[in-house]
Amino acid sequence: MTIARLFKRSVNTTLTKSRMAVYLWLFNVIFGLLIAAPFCFMIRNEASRSLMGDRLIRGIDFNFLGDLITKYSDSGALLSGGIIMPIFLFILLSLFFNGGIIGRLFAETEKPNLKDFLSDGARYYFRFFRVFIISLFVYGLVFGLLFRMIGSIFEAWTKNAVSEWPLIWAANLKFIILLLLFSIIRMFFDYVRIRLVAEDSKKTIRATFLTFGFVFKRFFKTWALYITAAAVTLSFGVIYLLGVKIIPNSGILFIVLLLWQQFYVISKMWTKILFFSGEYHLFKQVENSAV
């Protein structure tokens, strides 16, 4: 099956499973409100009933925020609870939601509902957590060693540069290589998760080695499908930025801007399902042809 046909099928599947994008959006909103609440309370406590409060409504006063951060800088809760913990919790929730998405994709004939979505998230959570630990090792190996070696090559190239152009080209090429390596590793571990669900297996190390052979044999096809989904994500981002530029941030149109922002968040959730859907169909096609 060609990339175009696989992508078309993944779009159709994502459309039939679009309810999951709403679930992800709702959880994203709830999570965002829970994280933002302490900071909003802190700012309200410091700025309410004052001229600074009026200034903050019209726009962010970075001097005030700097003073606020300095005042609470000795609070461990502000650093660990307000910054580090949300990142950690977001990663854990992402693993949970990935289980829900992939589990519901394998239930082809069933319409997704919240109960089954959450059930799949819990069922595959610890398997995906082990995959996450393995992925951390791989990311560290690639970006700690391989990318450093690539950087040394560019440094040798620009060492005797007589103008800034080699430096600019080197910086841009390094950034592109960074993105490409990140996309490849992320794609690879997506297929590891899909294999675990397909085989209903808990053997994450075995699944990782088997997935390496799967991706290596058809690397350009798997990556082309991934890049196609990434292009859709990028297109949504461009459309969102154009809308933000057009919609005035004042008056009643401010509500329209808020709705536009939430539409963009839902589009990101939708494309998340699209990534997994394309990988699911490719994996299923290869497995069926091997039977």
Image (cartoon, rainbow, N blue to C red):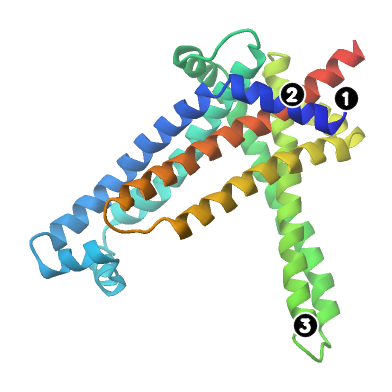
Q: Which residue is mark 3?
A: 165
Q: Nearer the viewer, residue 169 or 7?
A: 7
At label 1, which amino acid type do we have?
A: Met
At label 2, which amino acid type do we have?
A: Arg
Quadrant housing the N terminus: top right
Q: CA distance from mark 3 to mark 2?
A: 44 Å
Q: CA distance from mark 3 to mark 1?
A: 43 Å
**Residue pushed farthest top?**
109
Circles 1, 2 touching at the beta carbon (< 8 Å): yes
The x, y position of residue 24, in whole percent, is: 47, 30
Residue at position x 82%, y 87% in the image: 161
286 vs 252, left or right, is right
Asked which secondary structure carries label 2, the reply is helix
Name the quadrant containing residue 2.
top right
Asked which secondary structure carries label 1, the reply is loop
Dot in front, 3 or 1: 1
Q: Nearer the viewer, residue 174 or 228?
A: 228
The x, y position of residue 259, in whole percent, is: 38, 42
* Number of numbered callouts drawn: 3
Q: CA distance from mark 1 to mark 2?
A: 10 Å
Q: Which residue is mark 2?
A: 9
The answer to whether any part of residue 88 appears in the image is yes
Q: Which residue is mark 1?
A: 1
Residue 151 vs 159, above or below: the answer is: above
Name the quadrant containing residue 200.
top right
Name which of mark 3 and mark 2 comes first in the sequence: 2
Q: Nearer the viewer, residue 37 or 270?
A: 270
**Residue pushed farthest bottom?**
162
Asked which secondary structure carries label 3, the reply is helix
Residue at position x 79%, y 27% in the image: 6
